[in-house]
Amino acid sequence: LPSSYALSVFFIYAIFYIGLGSIIGKYLKGYITKENSVGISVFFTIFISLATLLVLYIFCLKKRKEITFPIIKTFAEGSKSTKYDMGFGILSWLVVFPLVTFFSSIFSIFIYAVFRVQKVPDQVAIYFLKATMQHPIYFILAMITIVILAPILEEFFFRGILQNFFKKFLNRWISIIFTSLVFAFVHFSYSQKLANITIVGSIFIFSLFLGFIYEKQKSLISPIFLHATFNAINVLNLLFIKGV
């Protein structure tokens, strides 16, 4: 993975996914009220995600496709089909979900035993989704962001770019760990306080699996579909099991 390519993608994320979001968010702050906050948040989030995805598409698949295609899928002799990668990613959930849930419970027991934290708050994404549940259109747009756009953007950046960038200097297992640490701490939220131990810790474990599957399949399609399935099941759990 050429350093210039990786730095260009980092720059796109910094400008569009982080910088543009901060600028627009600051501009809209004066227009946000209690009544329109959910709608503005939903449209703002999906706009930023689509804008970032569009710019990445233009740069990566139009200008630098000779580098991008091998990142997404290695069509070497003996490699599996795209459909196989999709199915492998979806079915991996059956193994990954119980293990992530197990470690989440361990982290929860730890923060209760040490800090007496009894209730772990929702992740920011789940809190965001809950806020849209009284508005069908907002809820659908939020689902599109969480189940489709976020897995594509995050897996391309973290597994496709960051993990491959680390592999230029480290072996693949250390690269998976370093990538997972970055991925987990990106999901840190000050509002979650000590519960970050459970949330960030669980996301770290999940990211290890995503990184391993990417290396095993030599295809970004598998971790994208695992990530999307994981998020989709969490949404269904929110809708039908918790009954919120």
Image (cartoon, helix red, strand yellow):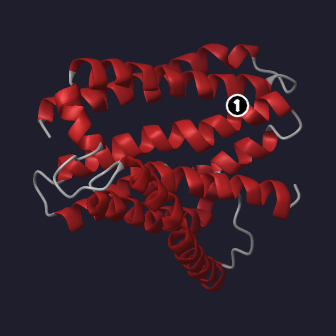
- Name the amino acid type tagged 1: Leu
Q: What residue is shown at x 27% (from left), y 60% (from top)?
A: 215
Q: Position of residue 73 (x, y in %)?
A: 28, 45
Label 1, residues with CA under 10 Å away: few <14, some 14-19, many ≥20: some
The quarter of the picture where the C terminus appears is bottom right
Q: Position of residue 222 (x, y in %)?
A: 41, 54
Q: Quadrant of residue 13?
A: top left
Q: What residue is shown at x 36% (from left), y 41% (from top)?
A: 156
Q: Is residue 64 above or below residue 237?
A: above
Name the one closer to the observer, 38 or 209.
209
Name the one closer to the observer, 193 or 187.
187
Q: What residue is shown at x 33% (from left), y 65% (from top)?
A: 212
Q: What residue is shown at x 60% (from left), y 77% (from top)?
A: 111
Q: Position of residue 221 (x, y in %)?
A: 40, 48
Q: Quadrant of residue 29?
A: top right
Residue occupied by mark 1: 141
Q: Is residue 191 above or below residue 106?
A: above
Q: Is residue 43 toward the left or the right of residue 114 in the image?
A: right
Q: Is residue 12 toward the left or the right of residue 190 in the image?
A: left
